[in-house]
Image: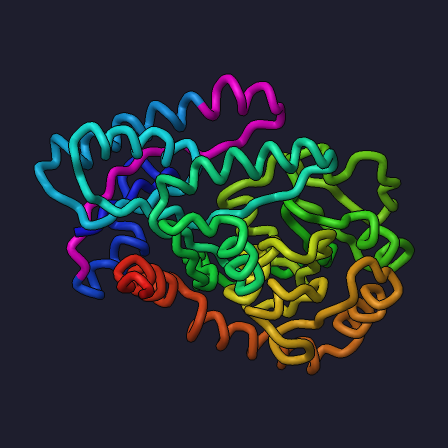
């Protein structure tokens, strides 16, 4: 049996993730709660978000190991905080349950000392983790070296997602726009240089000030700071196409927005990185441009605006790739295979 601690819903029993597990015939339990972080302030994250997550992990861990009266072969967790709560419970109740850390990303900091301290901290966390699952091949190589502790194995599986509202047709708009979204690892300065003066609006979905700090926002750019759930889906569904400018090269960033665009039959312009090339190839499912190259990004945007057949064909290939490789069924299949993979000799 595998236990999962989803933090995006109070009850995930009818979620696409749960349905995917059922379809595979997996023996599982969900211990769910809505612990999503939507905090604009670091202080709120520290004093509200993290304690909330820790309390959830404690309750879910006790339910998993004690009150559920099951003996899970593995528990899939989504954060270091959950690991640090669950690991003592595992030791206290003398269980051999594998701890699987899903979606791990070691993001860099500007100060070298802070990077060293973070590495020491995560090496401590990984001493309790049996399997780490990341979402790029480059990260798998990097983390295998950083956390070579004799216990932790690192696996790569592609991101996957389910998008609600795909069956609804886009609305005709008198004010067409292109869309970008996200805050982690973004290079909005390059994108703003690329779109300045173009005869199209750019909508930026970003709920954090830091990625936009110090940037001059062109007149044709509209920033949406509180755009979530259905509002975000509407923005994505009704956009001409999507642009994802990345300022990082060796960690996962931008893939989820890319996959969401693909699911909605949208062409995408995205920065070329090794982590992106695990998902799409240039000129096939997306247009890949060099990092920090505003001229190349502008040229790609202009081509998608001007060449409707080219854009439509790329969008169709992107949709086909999503449905075959990156939907929730594929993600669940890959995740279960990684959790149940025998330990390498």
At 49% from the left and 43% from the top, the residue drawn is 229
Q: Is residue 34 magenta?
A: yes
Return the x and y of residue 51 as percentages of the image width and height: 42, 21
At 70% from the left and 48% from the top, the residue drawn is 186
Quadrant of residue 17 within the rendered picture = bottom left
Return the x and y of residue 167 as percentages of the image width and height: 44, 63
At 50% from the left and 75% from the top, the residue drawn is 321
Q: Is residue 199 visible?
A: no
* Quadrant where the C terminus is found in the figure: bottom left
Report whether 86 appears left or right of 204: left
Q: Is residue 141 magenta?
A: no
Quadrant of residue 325 within the rendered picture = bottom left
Report whether 328 appears left or right of 202: left
Report whether 297 appears left or right of 224: right
Q: Is residue 201 visible?
A: yes
| Above-or-below relation of 339 to 230 | below
């Amino acid at each position: 049996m595998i236990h999962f601690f989803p933090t995006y819903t109070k009850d995930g029993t009818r979620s696409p993730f749960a349905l995917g597990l059922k379809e595979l015939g997996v023996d599982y339990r969900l211990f769910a709660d809505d612990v999503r972080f939507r905090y604009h302030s670091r202080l709120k994250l520290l004093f509200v978000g993290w304690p909330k997550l820790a309390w959830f992990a404690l309750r879910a861990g006790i339910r998993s190991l004690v009150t559920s009266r099951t003996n899970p072969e593995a528990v899939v967790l989504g954060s270091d905080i959950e690991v640090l709560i669950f690991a003592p419970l595992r030791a206290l109740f003398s269980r051999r349950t594998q701890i699987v850390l899903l979606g791990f990303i070691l993001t860099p900091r500007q100060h070298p000392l802070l990077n060293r301290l973070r590495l020491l901290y995560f090496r401590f966390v990984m001493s309790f983790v049996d399997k780490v699952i990341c979402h790029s091949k480059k990260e798998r190589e990097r983390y295998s070296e950083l956390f070579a502790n004799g216990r932790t194995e690192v696996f790569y599986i592609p991101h996957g997602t389910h998008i609600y509202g795909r069956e609804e047709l886009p609305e005709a708009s008198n004010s067409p726009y292109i869309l970008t979204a996200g805050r982690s690892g973004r290079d909005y300065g390059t994108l703003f240089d690329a779109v300045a003066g173009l005869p199209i609006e750019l909508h930026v979905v970003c709920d954090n000030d830091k990625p936009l700090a110090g940037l001059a926002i062109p007149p044709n750019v509209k920033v949406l700071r509180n755009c979530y759930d259905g509002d975000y889906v509407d923005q994505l569904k009704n956009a001409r196409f999507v642009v994802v400018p990345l300022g990082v090269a060796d960690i996962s960033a931008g893939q989820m927005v890319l996959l969401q665009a693909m699911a909605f039959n949208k062409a995408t312009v995205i920065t070329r990185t090794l982590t992106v090339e695990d998902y799409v190839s240039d000129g096939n499912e997306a247009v890949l441009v060099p990092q920090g190259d505003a001229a190349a990004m502008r040229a790609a945007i202009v081509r998608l605006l001007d060449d409707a057949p080219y854009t439509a064909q790329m969008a169709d290939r992107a949709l086909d790739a999503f449905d075959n490789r990156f939907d929730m069924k594929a993600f669940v299949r890959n995740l279960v295979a990684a959790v149940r993979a025998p330990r390498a000799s």
